Amino acid sequence: MDVGYGNKAKALLKRFYGYGSFRPGQLEIITAVAAGRDALVLMPTGGGKSVCYQIPALMSDGCAIVVSPLIALMQDQVASLVSNGIPAATVNSNISDADNRRVMDLFFEGKLKLLYISPERLMSDIDRWSPELKVSLIAIDEAHCISQWGHDFRPVYTSLSQLKGHFPSSPVVALTATADRLTRSDIARHLKLDDPFTWIGSFDRPNLSLRVIPESRKAKRLAYICGMIEKYPLDSGIVYCLSRKATESLDAELRGKGYRSCCYHAGMAASARDMAQRAFINGDVQVVCATVAFGMGIDKSNIRWVVHANLPANIESYYQEIGRAGRDGLPAETALFYSFADIAARQSLIQESGQPMLNMEKLSRMKEYAEASVCRRRILLSYFGETGSHDCGNCDVCQSPPERFDGTVLVQKALSAMVRTGEKVGAMMLVDILRGSARAEIFARGYDKIKTYGVGRDVPYAMWNAYLAQMLQLGLIEIAYEDGNRLRVTVEGHKALRGEIKVMLSKVDIGSRSPRKAKSGVTEKPKEDLVSYLKKVRKTIADREGIPAYIVFSDATLRDMAAKMPRDMASMKDVTGVGELKSARYGAVFLKAISDYMLARL
């Protein structure tokens, strides 16, 4: 590593960002790019990818071009850079033509260090740019969008292969949080990266707790979500739903209970989506109920929880979505609700997709994760090619290892009912038959006459759903999604039915599982009340300046501030995340807030 590059990079990190050291991999990547080498960077969401191209841009002559697919992400990145004293700007369709021209004039005059631009606008304008332009580097964010193997393929990204021809001497940095081996190879090939420095960071996010809740009842899911809002009253959370209708319904229920909520999905008008996103980013709402259309452009660091109300389509999407929590490195919670019906719904959607076989395989891996009885973090790491050496201790499986039992007889009851109905029923009807339901349809079809009618009435409905999910995972049954999602017995299932094999199931807890809220008047940590006070001060500043609260200071910075309790400007600069400009702009306000807090406690 070049010592000169390293020392300069560290000085810039402290001056503009307020940090005394780099995260793993950042300095190595920065040094390679600053030396003019292409790079392929794979880091988890919240791992610090942006610093890997922002600091080389500050170290070099000219302006860096940052290609990003989403306007919100570009705007947030620019706002954060400007708040740190770095000349950056973006051109996009959300601002006027006059403002876009003004930004481009600054770019052509060499007055910017970073220009954020969409791939569409870049490729439509690039032929008109002078070859004499000083482009320090080109950063391609969300680079997995270039690959058909990726989970978010965008055809326009393939045109970025032309960039090397336009700027042959400018290093290209491809960055992504989610890319398997095939996708990484595709990225390097399409972008024509020349012997790139490759960094594959750890996918481990130990600050995220992982939980899967086998629960199909709407009321239980709602109770859990309300519990999360109550647990983090000054912070934000996201609930991902399968459909647009579900986001609207949940949002209405939460608002009906008095919570500050909004919804977000692709069917909303652009202005309504932008309003919802701004409300969430600025902290005006506690929770956003959204489809997967939400989040890719969110750089909000203080999201404390993410809940999936339904099973995601694949592990890549799931990992990216939970990764939006805890980007500041502080503890954050994630929960995934999973029911048998989710599988059928997902498989129906997959049949309408462009790559059904590939997507079905990805869904299978997602199911394996949801139904696992081993450390969930190790499953995630394994999926991305990383081997976990020990259990994490921060997932539900580690904290409450499932108790196994011989479920052969229970399984045989379900399999027998399926066979006796001619394998013509779905999961809901099967459970109703096993529990002896008096549904009119059961009597109309004569299912009340079969021997297995009512043999499982001692097993609660939700528990049957969970056991059916395990049977599916074990390969005893399958879903005929092309035939109305009917259940069928597999070859292995027939062996179990005949008693040729023993089936071990994990016991299921169908309790409320609502998150525990701290007791009134009792703080979980010594400085928790000071942190809450500083958050309110931060919100006042953010509202006055019209910027998101986390751009003023992150939660991690406020916690370090509460721990160190600086008494003057010199000690304020020792707080992690307080750079030169922010110290000058906000230091006095927060010093006074800490002083007021201490006086109030005397």
Image (cartoon, rainbow, N blue to C red):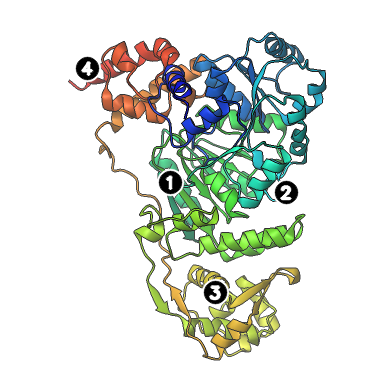
Residue under pointer 2: 148
Say what secondary structure mark 3 lies in: loop
Query: If you read the primary sequence from the N terminus, does the residue marked by circle 2 or circle 4 appear first?
Result: 2
Residue under pointer 4: 599
On screen, residue 51 above or below 357: above
Viewer-nearest of discs 1 and 2? 2
Nearer to me, 222 or 308: 308
Query: If you read the primary sequence from the N terminus, does the residue marked by circle 4 or circle 1 appear first?
Result: 1
In space, the residues marked 3 and 1 are separated at their CA atoms by: 29 Å
Q: What kind of residue is marked 3?
A: Leu
Say whether marks 1 and 2 touch (CB < 8 Å). no
Quarter of the C terminus within the rendering: top left
Query: If you read the primary sequence from the N terminus, does the residue marked by circle 3 or circle 2 appear first?
Result: 2
Query: If you read the primary sequence from the N terminus, does the residue marked by circle 1 or circle 2 appear first?
Result: 2
Residue under pointer 3: 474
Q: What kind of residue is marked 4?
A: Leu
In space, the residues marked 3 and 2 are separated at their CA atoms by: 31 Å
Q: What kind of residue is marked 1?
A: Glu
The local crowd at label 3, few if under 14, some if 14 to 19, many if 20 or more residues have their Cα within 10 Å, is some
In space, the residues marked 1 and 2 are separated at their CA atoms by: 31 Å
Say what secondary structure mark 4 lies in: helix
Say whether marks 3 and 4 touch (CB < 8 Å). no
Residue under pointer 1: 333
Nearer to me, 316 or 504: 316
Q: What kind of residue is marked 2?
A: Gln
In space, the residues marked 4 and 1 are separated at their CA atoms by: 34 Å
Say whether marks 3 and 1 touch (CB < 8 Å). no
